[in-house]
Amino acid sequence: MASIEAKTGPMTHSRLPRRGLSRHARLALVWLALAAVPFVVPNAYWISLANLALINLVLIASLNLLMGYGGQISLAHAGFFGLGAYASGILNVRYGLPPWAGLPAAAVVAGLGALLIGIPALRLRGHYLAMATLGWNAILVVFFTQLVGLTGGPNGLLGVAPFSIFGHALDTEAKAFPLAWAVAFLVMLAISNLLASRIGRSIRAVATNELGAQSLGIDSFRTKLAVFVLSAGMAGIAGSLYVHINQYASPETFGIAPSIMLLVMVAIGGAGTFYGPMLGALIYTAVPQILLDYEDAELMLFGLGLLVVLILFPRGLAGIPAALAGLVRRRRA
Amino acid sequence: MQTATALLQVLSAGIGTGAVYALVALGFNVVFKSTGAMNFAQGEWVVMGGMVTALLIGAFSSIGLAVVTAVVLVGIVGLLSERLTVQPLKKPDALVITLVTIGLSIVSRSLVMLVLGKKPVGYSGFSGNTALSVGGVSIQSQTLWIIAITLAFLVVMHAFFERTILGKALRAAAADREAAAIVGVNVGSTVLLSFGIAALAGALAGAIVTPLTLASYDQGAMFGFKGFSAAMLGGLGSLPGAVVGGLALGLLEAFGSFYISSDFKDAIAFAVLLLILFVRPSGLLGRADIVKV
């Protein structure tokens, strides 16, 4: 594979990074810049928004892995987020386990939740994963709401402990930021490495042409299942972060409506682009805050903005530079 | 005897709800057929149908006239929605249209909230809030209206798709866009028409179910999901499938909540639905053009 790419160098040039930096160096630079956020924002409220944005980034980036690169639509991403949050929270509140044990457990539980629904649904092509995940998310919400003894029901799960390092609790927004920052970095790094690997190429091959991929010996069912389970596991990690940073979780955070919004944010940011989810997470976190002042018109402005972006930039905000560049090139030609 | 009565009672309630789901599923299927997209705005038109009818009843003092006017108005909203949001798309593939309908649903919901208010509204049944008693089984008269009106609408729709040139054009475009365009079908206008019909069906569902459930601006998503599920259950894109899927879902919910647990009603319905889909992926009446991998 590598030798072919080397020979056809000029042709694949546009796919190489524009600057000389490696993808790891670029990601590290971006994250170093993000580390400055707590020092430049005016107060703790802003830091709490930054934490939320990082959690949303994990959610949107992992959904982008499935949808943008894998070509599969999941409408249960908020449900997997909830599975992670409740798994980690319940282990802590009801069984006294530390949050650090809950974090991997959250990933495993959410991954298993995806495996259960993915095995039957991904054998079928078309809208079946969308339908199955929609139903699955609806079922999960019923369980989050009705299993009051475990989840606290509609009132939410209260008294969740924060993460702590060497007995030092990360119980303020500023203390929790480095953790959210580091976890988001690790997830982005994992996605980047995955995409560059053999599996990553299989994922894109299956999304582009399933039959073609199969004829090259790629097991398309296993590839789709693997990326679905991985993506859900990452959502579970986001859930664990969420529940221990907020020290609370309630069912409406994990319903179908947020699942749909996450899907939209992947598209708005730019599906199938590595940094697109950062734009998606920024918008998903910031816009509701900005629109708070408009009260009843909030929903309307949000919806209109969404429509405008989708109609004008169907490839998402991350696609705007490329679209402009294309326009310039056409002018010159 | 007691149990038989209860059984019939649950059966009639399930068929009533199922008929409403069938209408929503029909609207969903029409748009799916013409665009390949999942229409997330479908449920909002159901709410609009109920809320606009409630508004007009005050002005018209005739329920029939209010329902017909409201349904036509919402149909026009459907046409406008397509012209304003779907038609401007440069590359209208199914995913982009699906995402656009999510935006459309948010805008529609907030429009309903801003224009018609946040309070749930309702009106009495078409022949008052009476209940008929048949052999000890008491049935809401509105449930009978729902079943009758749904049946009538289905007959009209069947005639439209089978007998009129416009209906045939719609089917042709759904079967093969390019071939239909070659023989002179204006494919763009069939998408427009499908949004109109979908809004009409949704609004009718809303107008007839509101006496039983009240209508509120935030119910749209629920109706949309139920309609989507019913459409999948019956077989995506199939008109009889929408009816069978809707009825099956309505009955599932009614019996699930009666015999097992009303708290877990939705979970039961969705779980059975998923099981059916995994066993029969093309739905109860769908053709077997699903590809296994």
Image (cartoon, coloured by chain):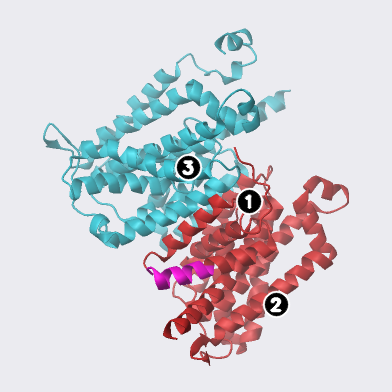
Quarter of the N terminus of chain B within the rendering = bottom left
Query: Residue B169: x, y in percent?
Result: 81, 58
Residue hosting label 2: B152
* Amino acid at the residue labelled 3: Gly
Quarter of the C terminus of chain B within the rendering = top right
Name the chief secondary structure element in magenta. Answer: helix
Residue B252 among those drawn in magenta = yes
Would you say A39 lies left or right of B275 here? Answer: left
Q: Which mark, residue A118?
A: 3
* Amino acid at the residue labelled 1: Ala
Q: Chain A is shown in which shade?
A: cyan
B5 lies above or below A64: below
The chain that hosts pointer 3 is A
Q: Of helix, strand and loop, which one carries label 1?
A: loop
A39 lies above or below B71: above
Which is more N-terminal, label 2 or label 1? 1
Query: Residue A200: x, y in percent?
Result: 50, 25
* x 66%, y 30%: residue: A327
Query: Residue B13: x, y in percent?
Result: 51, 77
Crowding at mark 1 (Cα within 10 Å: few <14, some 14-19, many 20+): many
Q: Of helix, strand and loop, which one carries label 3?
A: helix
Q: Residue furthest left?
A: A167
* x 72%, y 58%: residue: B192
Can residue B48 be seen from the camera position used here? no
Out of A54 and B252, give the one closest to the viewer. Answer: B252
A223 lies above or below B158: above
The chain that hosts pointer 1 is B
Out of A21 and B33, give the one closest to the viewer. Answer: B33
Residue hosting label 1: B37
* x 81%, y 45%: residue: B178
Q: Which residues are magenta?
A: B250-262
